[in-house]
Image (cartoon, rainbow, N blue to C red):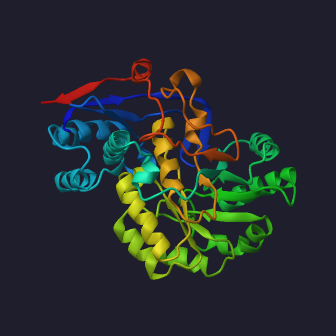
Amino acid sequence: MKVTEVVIRPVQIPRKESFGVRTGKYDFLPNTYVAVHTDEGVTGYGEAAPIVDYFGESQETIVEVLKKYLAPLLIGKDPLNIRQRINEMDVVIPRNPCAKAAIDISLHDIKGKVFGASIGSLLGGVSQKQVPITVSIGLDEPEVMTKKAVAAATDGFTVLKLKGGQNVVDDLQNLRVVREAIGREGPWLRLDANAGYVNRAEIYRYIPEFESLRIILLEQPYPSQEWRALRSLRDRIRIPILLDESMQTAWDFQQLVQSPEGFVANLKVQICGGLYKASQLVAACERFQIPVMIGSQRESVIGNTASLHLASIIHRLDYTCDQRYANAVTDDANIVDDGPSLAKPTVMVPEGRGLGITVNWKKSERIALASFSIKK
């Protein structure tokens, strides 16, 4: 089997409603779809989902990297030898993980279809047939955040994630209002500061109040490489610290392994550079007894489903996973006919071949900004 063509399609995917984070609100997902065709008629699909203001890659850089560097490497090559294809991409360009993730997901989709196995099976075997998920609530007026929190609690979700990071005082006020609305024994709360607390010690004075609000995880309070500050806070607070932006490179993992107690690793297919490398990190975390959850990187259904397959191989899931963005895509922009339902507290992992979903590629034309074909 050989790759004959790679189609690169940057898209603008509208959301059902705006979602607020520390750096602003956004109304659409600026992602890039990839279709990898083979000479045996098997096609694999992938997705790149960048967050430029946190991780540096943009839709524009992804398209250029795919067109000029990564897609040409695949033409005429065996798509089933995923390890070799990944090594070749890393030689040509060392970073750009979201662009590589689109290719990686496509290759796993092909391999699963050829061998009649789900991606979870390809990655070593499924431990979780159902994945517990978190509801995420974007930064907004307190009454809007509270209304969404109450609705999610009524639907049975056990963990509600609130976006924050602008300042500690405002974040605590939002947490207080939500906690009062959902009850002292209601769902756990999780605060995502998105690396926003630049005054490292200011949070120390508020530790008792954080601990009183039934917070299950405090996510990325400080910038990504502030390991000394992260460890100092970890030693003062009884809430586990979830590392997100701090889980981008092998160097980051080395820092975590040196002193893992009190930390949880938030692994993302996009930031790891694909399923192949992400699954290696899952195994490494399990080896060092580091709790893991699988995060969401603004993917639509293709990338989100890949993340579900990654979550399915985790032997023990102590924390709910982020799978929120695919649920926010408008129905007319969803190019997957049978994607996993994200409306309930747990989601079934597809058991079909490859991604286990049916991609309606033609439907992506209506949200496409362009389309590029790379072939011999």
Viewer-closest of 211 and 324: 324
Image location of residue 288, percent across then percent down: 48, 77
Q: Would you say residue 25 is visible in this rendering?
A: no
Q: Could you tell me residue 153's position as x and y percent?
A: 79, 47
Instruction: Answer left or right for 173 relative to 101.
Output: right
Residue 291 as seen in the image, left or right of residue 95: right
Q: Locate the N terminus by quadrant.
A: top left
> In this image, 368 relative to 161: left or right?
left
Q: Residue at x 76, y 56 (%)?
A: 175
Q: Is residue 245 above or below residue 375?
A: below
Q: Can residue 340 be seen in this view?
A: yes
Residue 208's image quarter?
Answer: bottom right
Q: What is the count of numbered marks?
A: 0
Locate residue 52: give its quadrant.
top left
Between residue 276 and residue 213, name the one nearer to us.
276
Quarter of the rendering occupied by the C terminus: top left
Q: Which residue lies furthest to the left in this view?
A: 376
> Residue at position x 24%, y 43% from top?
79
Q: Position of residue 270 (x, y in %)?
A: 41, 49
Give the vertical position of 14 relative to 347 (above or below). Answer: above
Residue 321 horizontal/vertical position (percent)? 59, 54
Which residue is at a point 71% across and 60% down the rendered structure image? 169
Quarter occupied by residue 61: top left
Work out whether residue 151 or residue 106 is closer to the camera in this orientation and state it: 106
